[in-house]
Image: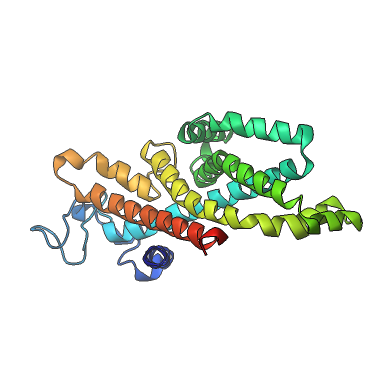
Amino acid sequence: MIAAFITIACVLATMLAPWIAPFNPFDPTQISLWDGKLPPSWIEGGQAQYILGTDNQGRDMLSTILYGGRLSIIVGIAAVCLGMALGVILGVISGYFGGAVDAIIMRIADIQLTIPGILLAILINGIGRTLLPLEMREDFAIYVVIFAIGLTDWPQFARVTRGATLVESQKEYVQAARVIGLPRWLIIVRHILPNVMRPVLVIATIGLALAIISEATLSFLGQGIPPTTPSLGTLIRVGNEYLFSGLWWITLFPAAALVVLVFAVNLLGDWMRDALNPKLR
């Protein structure tokens, strides 16, 4: 419950960033290069209006963390939804129809699972950027990152959904639906899908934390969100360049926000797994 509270608080704080953030990091009129690299307000040399200090461009760290966290959460949720939709569809088809369809889908999933997810995301992200015209790459960078992370996540959803579908398809109510002549698509939508979503939602919650980490990793490596658009990954990457010059706050505070957010989401996923497991009731 504490993890749920922290997660909700983080999501609300980031989504309400335009109203609660002290400054707008996207507004050039609110950014001053003369105020760049200021320490937090409680350290000598800091200013009261910059509670967590400023980055190299003079942006307020607290504001950039709120706006950057919002972008990281949106990318994570969108990527998980994409991977879940693709994985659930393929998993249900694989488990219900079986045969050659099942073999092909599962072998593709097995092959993809042998490749580290972050390397596959970098590959997909690189291909996506190459296919886009040069003037469109920065505008569509967020969508390419969502697509890359989503495509790396579908196999785990597909495997879980396939196993649950194999169990549900042998139960009496599904057999009765077949006997009375319901079409296959209606059986899948009305009877199979509602009963296989419980474990999928647990994986989606844990997958959200992994998707946020993946976005931060891609951005840290310079393969994700452009540096001009603050996300937790880009903030950590920018701060890392100044870490050994004593400007520790540019890296520490975004990294701490990322750790707290991911840790809370992971604990929330563990709680959901236990709460939705009927054997533990």
**Residue 107, placed above or below residue 34:** above
Residue 24 position in % (x across, y down): 35, 62
Q: Which of 261 and 271 is in front in this view?
A: 271
Residue located at (85% from left, 58% from top)? 176
Answer above or below: position of 110 versus 277: above
**Is residue 220 depicted above or below 177 in this figure?**
above
Q: In which quarter of the image is the N terminus?
A: bottom left
List x then y, in percent, for residue 159.
62, 42
Q: Which colour scheme is used?
A: rainbow
- State the image quarter where residue 12 is shown: bottom left
Residue at horizontal 41%, vertical 45%? 213
Question: Total label count?
Answer: 0
Which residue is most to the left? 44
Q: Could you say which is closer to the camera, residue 43 or residue 3? A: 3
Q: Is residue 68 visible in this depiction of the protein?
A: no
Image-quadrant location for residue 43: bottom left
The foreground one among 221 and 104 is 104
Q: Where is residue 18 in the image (x, y as percent from the top left)?
A: 40, 67
Horizontal side of residue 112 vs 184, given as left or right: left
Image position, residue 141 (x, y; %): 50, 43
Position of residue 60 in the picture relative to residue 97 (left or right): left
- Residue 218 visible in the snapshot: yes
Q: Which residue is drawn at 48% across and 51% down?
A: 206
Q: Is residue 42 left or right of residue 235?
A: left
